[in-house]
């Protein structure tokens, strides 16, 4: 039952566990938000998919219809809190205007960045379960309102891109603040506050809010809202989808995206897959507080007998906070 509950909480579209590594894959797909936690030190994870889209601008009388491919490579770097991220998106479409038709094919975006977990409210925290009262065990806990906090920094690479402004430089920054709350009810709330291309002529600011819920050990679903704001374009997109766990390291997903206006109207349909390679992962071991006390009090005599040999300590896995 404990393992079933772990899978139920850990498997969601975004990262669910209050730790860097979980028993099952944690993917940011199919949502567009980025979770606060990394994949885990030495872990490599690939996430990708394909999408169909249609955008129609009633005022300008333009229509764009096409297909795209997107891929993300995530890898845990020198420590558990640090993750490197490479993102790329290739798109082909037919752009129709009152003056003619243009067929476009190009890399729409390429971003290289890193994410670092600044604060985990469950690190070094151990909750004492109340086995006598079901109500006390599953009641709302105020600690759940304290989010995990991470920061992200990256660079956009512009390779003669027809989907961006001509004045955009080859390199421009992307910055993000990430928060994540996990609730005992099984819901997970992730927020991203984004400042993109802030040094260019057309900087963009916005945010993403994602609410995710697991329905079983295999299925999960999510609702998401994404806000764009710039001098050139402003919009609110609504996204929903589901993910299915094939194996502990493989996940399939699908989602739909739309907005509420017609300048332009937006529709996206996406399917994808995420795969994790964790053969090189080694649990991070830390010294528990109880062990330290034992070393200071109970092992003094052993130190005298053993001479220079180090004191015996029991290492424990880094707490994940998974319930």
Image (cartoon, rainbow, N blue to C red):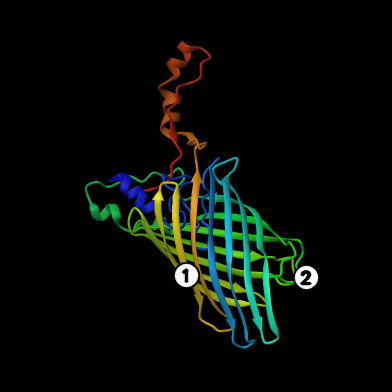
Residue 245, how many percent across, how many down? 40, 53
Identify the residue at the far left of this view: 132
Q: Which residue has dot 2 on it? A: 167
Residue at 42 percent of width and 24 percent of height = 297
Q: How many marks?
A: 2
Q: Earlier in the sequence, mark 1 or mark 2?
A: 2
Residue at 62 percent of width and 74 percent of height = 229
> Could you tell whether 135 is left or right of 194 in the image?
left
Q: Along the line of sight, which residue is nearer the eye, 286 or 85?
A: 85
Is 76 rendered above or below residue 271? Answer: above
| Cα distance between the residues tagged 1 and 2 | 32 Å
Q: Which residue has dot 1 on it? A: 256
Which mark, residue 318? none
Q: Along the line of sight, which residue is nearer the eye, 22 or 307?
A: 22
10 Å neighbourhood of mark 1: few (<14), some, or many (≥20)? some
Residue 144 occupies quadrant:
bottom left
Residue 256, how many percent across, how many down? 47, 70
Label 1 SS: strand
Residue 41, how many percent across, how many down? 54, 41
Q: Along the line of sight, which residue is nearer the eye, 149 or 47?
A: 47
Is 35 rendered above or below residue 291? Answer: below
Q: Along the line of sight, which residue is nearer the eye, 47 or 203?
A: 47
Give the label, 1 or 2, closer to the camera: 1
Is 204 rendered above or below residue 171? Answer: below
Label 2 SS: loop
């Amino acid at each position: 039952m404990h393992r079933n509950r772990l899978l139920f909480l850990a498997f969601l579209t975004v990262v669910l566990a209050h730790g860097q590594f979980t028993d099952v894959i944690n993917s940011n797909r199919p949502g567009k938000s980025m979770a606060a936690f990394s994949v885990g030190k030495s872990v490599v994870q690939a996430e990708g998919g394909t999408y169909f889209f249609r955008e129609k601008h009633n005022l300008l009388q333009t229509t764009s219809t096409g297909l795209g491919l997107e891929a993300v490579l995530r890898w845990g770097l020198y420590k558990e809190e640090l993750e490197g991220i490479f993102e790329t998106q290739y798109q082909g479409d037919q752009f129709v205007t009152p003056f003619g038709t243009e067929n476009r094919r190009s890399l729409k975006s390429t971003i290289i960045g890193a994410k670092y977990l600044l604060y985990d409210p469950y690190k070094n925290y151990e909750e004492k379960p109340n086995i006598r009262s079901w109500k006390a065990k599953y009641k709302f806990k105020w600690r759940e309102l304290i989010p995990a906090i991470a920061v992200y920094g990256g660079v956009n690479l512009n390779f003669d891109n027809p989907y961006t402004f001509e004045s955009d430089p080859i390199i421009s920054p992307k910055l993000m603040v990430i928060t994540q709350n996990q609730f005992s009810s099984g819901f997970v709330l992730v927020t991203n506050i984004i400042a993109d291309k802030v040094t260019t002529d057309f900087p963009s600011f916005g945010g993403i809010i994602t609410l995710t819920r697991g329905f079983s050990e295999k299925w999960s679903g999510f609702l998401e809202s994404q806000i764009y704001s710039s001098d050139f374009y402003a919009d609110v997109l609504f996204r929903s989808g589901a993910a299915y766990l094939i194996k502990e390291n493989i996940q399939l997903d699908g989602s739909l995206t739309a907005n509420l206006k017609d300048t332009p109207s937006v529709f996206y349909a996406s399917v994808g897959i995420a795969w994790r390679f964790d053969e090189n992962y080694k649990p991070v071991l830390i010294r528990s507080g109880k062990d330290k006390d034992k070393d200071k009090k109970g092992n003094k005599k052993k130190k005298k007998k053993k001479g220079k040999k180090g004191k015996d300590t029991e290492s424990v896995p880094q707490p994940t906070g998974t319930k």
